[in-house]
Amino acid sequence: MAMDVINKFYSTVHTTVSQLSGVLPGNNVTREYEVLEQVCTAGVGLMWKVYNGYKKSTKQEVSVFVFEKKMLERWAKDDRETMLETLRRGVQQLTKIRHPHVLTVQHPLEESRDSLAFATEPVFASLANVVGDAVRSDKKLYDVEIRHGLLQLFDGLSFLHNDAKIVHRNICAETIVINKNRSWKLFGFDFCIANQPSVDGKSFWPCREYSTSIHVLAQPSLEYCAPEIALNTINSPESDLFSLGVLVFTIYSGKPLKMFGSDYSSFRRYAADLNQRKYPSMNSVPSELIESLRALLHPSPNMRPQLHELKQIVYFQDVGVKTLSYLDSLYQWDNLQKSKFYKGLPQIIPTLPHRVNLHSILPYLVKEFINSPMIPFVLPNVLLIAEMSSQKEYCEHILTHLKPIFKLNDPIQILLIFMQKMDLLLKLTPAEEVKLHVLPLLYRSLECDMPQIQELCLAVLPTFSNLIDYNAMKNAVIPRIKKLCLNSTNVSVKVNCLISIGKLLEDLDKWLVLDEILPFLHQIQSREPAIIMAIIGIYKIAMTNTKLGITKDVMAHKCIPFLMPLCVENGLTIAQFNTIVALIREMFGRVEKEQREKLEQLSTIQRENKPRDASEILATELEKGTGSLSQGAKANTSLTNSVNSDDDMFSGFSISPPTKQSSAPSQGIQQLKLKSNNDALKISHTSSPKPDILSSLMNSNISNLSNSSSPKSSVAPTSAMSPIVNPYTSPGSNVTSPNQSHSTDAWTNNWHSANPLVMNHQLASPQANNSSNNNSSSLDKLNPFGGGNKSASVQRQVVNYIYPSGYNSSGASGISNGNSMSSLNNMNNLTPLIPQQNAAQKQAQDNKNLNTLSQQDILSFLN
C-alpha cells in the first residue's frame, strides 16, 4: 500500500515536471520560484493552471498561475491575440490592486514563447472547483464558509466600486479564488472597466456590446451578465450585483440560472423574461436569503440592494460568521478589545467545523504570536484547535508556530498554559521535537517561582520519562527536582517533588538511586507527615523493585538508622505509624535473612577448605574400610561388642589397660577383631590414589601382621611351639610366679604398636620390671591425651607392636601359652633387628625415633 502511494506520488510529480519542462523553461518565474504539483484551475474558461510552489531564496510558499499558449492553437489568429491581450491586461490590473479580499500578486506576469506565468499568495481552489455535485466531499463548502465568503466578496466589491471605481463585469465562479486560509478573493479582472469622467460629474462606465464574432471566452460570461447590458447597453456597479446574485444561486444549486453559451439571442429573451419577474425555483437557497437574492436579480439596477444593506440581513447574523468577520478586521482593534474577543473564542471554536478552525481561525491566531502581551489569550485557543487535530495536521499547521513560543519565559502565564496542556503536547509532538523543545520548557518550569507551575511540571514529568535519555535525566532533571525540593518553602511543592522522584525510580538504575536519591532523602529537614510518607514511599519502591533492590549493607547502615527516628515524629496518625514500622520490620527481616545465609555459606566454605591433621585422615580411612567389610565381617563385629576395646583413633598411642589371663574364646574374638582391622587397613590403603610415607608404613606393618597370622602358624601343634621370649628382658631377671610369669611373658611377647606410624623394628621393648611407682611404659609420651601416671593398683600397660617383615625370632626363648591368640603364637619366628642395648639407651632411641617420625613424616603427609 505504501509503495502504491509512493509510486502514485512519484508519477504525479514526474508528470507535472514533464508538463512544465516544455512550458516554463524560458519563463522568468522559474528563476525565483520552484514549481511543484498542480492544485486547481481558475480564470476565464478555467484556462489558468495553478501550481503549488515556493520562493527559492526565502522558502516562502506561493501559487504559480500558468497559462499555456498551446491551448489557443485551434483558435483563429485574431481571437488568439485578443485572448492573450485580455489575459495580460487582467493580470496587470490585478497586480495594481491591493486589498485583503483581492488576490495578492507576489510576482508580476512573465511571458515566454510558450506561456504566461505569475506568482500569488497560496491558493486552495477556485470557487468553480468546489461548487457542484461532482466536487469531492473534502472540498465541499460548509454553510458558514459560504456565508463568510459572501461577506468577503461584499467587502471586495465595495472597495472596487467605491474606492477603485472599477466595475468587474465578470463576477462568476471561475473568477473567485479561495486562498489557503479559506478567504474568498476577487480574481479575473480581464474585462473590468474603470470609470470615465463625464460632463455632469457623475461616474460613468462605458459598455462594450457583446459581439458574436469574438470567441465566447474572450468576452464576459453571458450566464452572469446583467439584463441591462443586453437590453439597454448600460454598465454600472449594479451590474456586478446582479452577477453576484447569480453567483449565490450557483453556489447553492450547483449551476447558474440558465446556460447560454455563445447564444446571445437566447440571452436577450431571458433578459426580457426577468423584466416580468419570472425567477427560477430557489428551493436550494436558504429561506432567509431568498428575498435578498430576488432583490439582487431584479431587472432594474436601481432596485437592487446596496452591499452594506446586504450585510445586515438575518442570513449573516450567525455567530460563526460574525466570529470569522471579526477576525478579518482584527488588526483594527487594540489589545483590550482583542483580549475580550479571545477570551470568548473557546466557546465558539467547538461549534465550528474543524476545517474552518484549522484554516480560517488558526492563521489569524498565530499572527498574534508576535504580540507578546496577547499570547496568554491566544495560546489556549491554539491548543484547543490542536486538540481537535490529527498529528499530521498538528505538525503541519501548529507545531511550527509553537516552537518559538516554547522558548519564551515572559509572560509567565505561557508556562502555566503549556503545563496544563502538556499531555496534549506529548501526544501530538514527535519524540525528537519533544527532546528539542518540550524538555527545555520543563526545565524552565522547574526553575520558575510560581508553585502552581512547578507542581504541574512535577505532575506531568513522569508521564514522558521514557522520552528522556539517561544523561539528561541524571544531569538535568534529577538535580533540578532535588534543588527545588530542598529550597522550596512550600510543603505541597516538596511533596510533589518526592512523588515525582518516586514515579521516576523505575527509569533510573540501581547506582543512581543508591548514590543520588537515597542520600538526598537524608538532607530533607522537613518532618511534616506528608513529606515523611512520601519519603517512605520512595524507600518502599526502591526496596521492592527487582531492578533497584537496596542492598542489606545500605539498609543496615543508612536506611534503618534514618527511618527509626521518623516513626516517633509528632503528628503521625496510627495508620502512618504502622506503615513506617512495617517498612522497618521488612528491611530488618531482609537484613537478617541475607546475613544469615551469608554466614552459613562462609561456614560451609571454611569447613571444606580447612586442612585436616593425620588423626582425622586415619579416622576417615578406617570408616571407609569398615563400611566395605563383608557381611561375615559385620557378623564378627557384633561379637566384639562385648569386648572392651577403645575405637579412638589415638588408641595406638595410648597405653592399653591391664589384661588378665584370658580364656581361649576371648583370645579368638580378639584375633577376629585384629584380623578385621587389618583387612580394613588393607582395603582403604589399597584404594588410595596417592601413595605417601604414611601409606607405605601402614602397608608394611599390615603385611607383617598378616604374615604372622598366616594359616601355617595357626595350624602348628601347640606342643611344637617354642616359648615366646622377650628379647628385651635382661638375662638376670626371673619369673616369681606362674601367673606373674605368664603375664610378663605375654606382655613382652605381645608388645607392638597398632599405630602404622610407629616403626616397630626400631623400637625397644619396655622394661619388664618397672618400679611400683611407674606403672606406665616408655610410650606414655606418645599418648595425645596426655596419659600420665596411673594409680598404684593399675597393672603395667600393654602396647602391641607390629613387627616388620623379615623379623626372625630363631634362638629366642619364651614361655609358651596354649591359651594365647593365634596371631600372637605365630610371632615365635620373629627376630629383633636391632642389637641388644641396655634399657636406658633403648628408651632414648625409642623416643627419638618416634618424635622424628611423628613431626616430619606426618607434616610431609599433610602437605
Image (tube, helix red, strand yellow):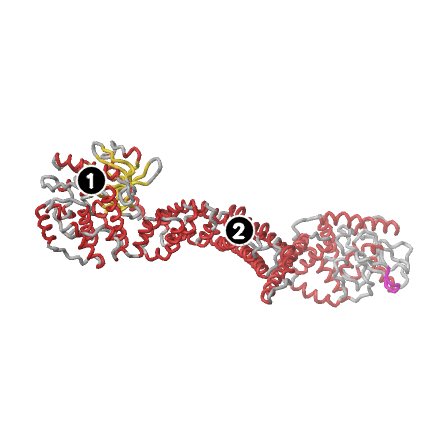
In this view, 108 is above or below 158: above
Q: Earlier in the sequence, mark 2 or mark 1?
A: 1
Left of 351 or right of it: where is 757?
right
Q: Is residue 330 something that shows in the picture?
A: yes
Q: What kind of residue is marked 2?
A: Asp
In this view, 693 is above or below 74: below
Picture coordinates of residue 329, whole percent (x, y): 33, 48
- Identify which residue, 64 or 719, lies in the foreground: 64
Q: What kind of residue is marked 1?
A: Ala
Q: Which residues are magenta?
A: 789-795
For the image, the number of numbered tags is 2
User: In the image, which disc is placed on residue 449?
Assistant: 2
Picture residue at 62% right of the left edge, 61% below the top:
584
Q: Is residue 715 something that shows in the picture?
A: no
User: In the image, which disc is placed on residue 194?
Assistant: 1
Whether 794 is among the magenta residues is: yes
Picture coordinates of residue 619, whole percent (x, y): 71, 57
For marks 2 and 1, give the one nearer the viewer.
1
Whether 165 is among the magenta residues is: no
Left of 331 or right of it: where is 802?
right
